[in-house]
Image: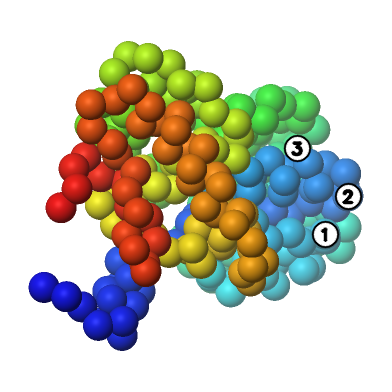
Amino acid sequence: MCLGFGSAAAVLRLRYIPPVHILLIEDDTEAARVLVKGLRESGYMVDHAADGREGLSRALSGKFDLIVTDRMLPQIDGLAIIQQLRRTRLPTPVLVLSALGTVDDRIRGLKAGGDDYLTKPFAFAELLARIEALLRRHSGAAESAVLRVADLEFDLIARKVTRGGREIELTAREQKLLEFLMRREGQVVTRTMLLEGVWDLHFDPQSNLVDVHISRLRQAIDRGAERPLIHTVRGSGYVLREEEE
């Protein structure tokens, strides 16, 4: 059956799964820059607030899936932010980042309503693992840390991609693109969805940016395989699935 353009667009809107939206509250400019860059490259949408008052205002909007906050902040400290959120019964999970790492400090952070507490300095890989664990716990889903489509596997913790047991070397951007597609297995994703979810661009740069990266990913994933997994849907976008329909 052939769908008209309007019908196809409506189906795509219904099937769109938005990326996880994180609020980072951090007053250290350089630390915030590094964290925002790393989280976006890992597939998350990130908003940044530079002080406690702005952070609390944004957090109370309720539009975030997770909040990552420094503990010592100007105007309103991190624990006061959490207490205010919990008083308003906002269930958004909160991960506290702090240079204060004694047992008593961690206990105070958790008693204030924090869901996890990570002491500075920390490895970025551990931050990602904590975020993924909090999101799984909050959703109530026992989601695997490994994405699988046919014989393609993506270990999200080790950031390791294999197909048929063969390890595939991908750039960070290609990994982000692959994760976006694998999480939407069987769903057609448009260029706009990819630009927003993978590149955090809310406009079309009028270039072949998406096409070039899809081509490179397809070559890495499907080269030498019996069946391709990445397919082009003419006039709509791309889909990752085991077989062509």
Q: Nearer the viewer, residue 63 or 35?
A: 35
Query: In the picture, residue 51 is in which quadrant?
Result: bottom right
Do the CB atoms of the residues marked 2 and 1 lie less than 8 Å apart?
yes
At a point 35% along the width and 54% down the height, the residue shown is 232
**Residue 32, placed above or below residue 8:** above
Q: Amino acid at mark 3?
A: Ser
Q: Amino acid at mark 1?
A: Ala
Instruction: Count residues near mark 2 (Cα–Cα under 10 Å), then give few for <14, some for 14-19, many for 20+.
Output: few
Q: Quadrant of the N terminus?
A: bottom left
* Element assignment for label 2: helix
List x then y, in percent, for residue 149. 27, 35
202 displayed left or right of 174: right
Q: Is residue 227 left or right of residue 131?
A: left
Q: Residue furthest left?
A: 1
Instruction: Tell me the residue that label 1 is attached to.
Output: 50
Q: Which mark is residue 98?
A: 3
Q: Residue at x 70, y 72 (%)?
A: 57
Q: Nearer the viewer, mark 2 or mark 3?
A: 2
Q: CA distance from mark 1 to mark 3?
A: 15 Å
What is the spatial separation of the Cα atoms under label 2 and label 1, in whole angstroms? 8 Å
Q: Name the amino acid type tagged 2.
A: Thr
Percent position of residue 39, x then y: 64, 44
In the rendered view, would you say 89 is above or below 199? below
Q: Nearer the viewer, residue 139 or 200?
A: 200
Judging by the rendered image, the residue that carries numbered circle 2 is: 29
What is the quadrant of residue 174 in the picture? top right
Report x, y in % for residue 29. Answer: 88, 49
- Element at label 1: loop
Q: Is residue 84 visible?
A: no
Residue drawn at the location 67% of the way across and 66% of the way down: 205
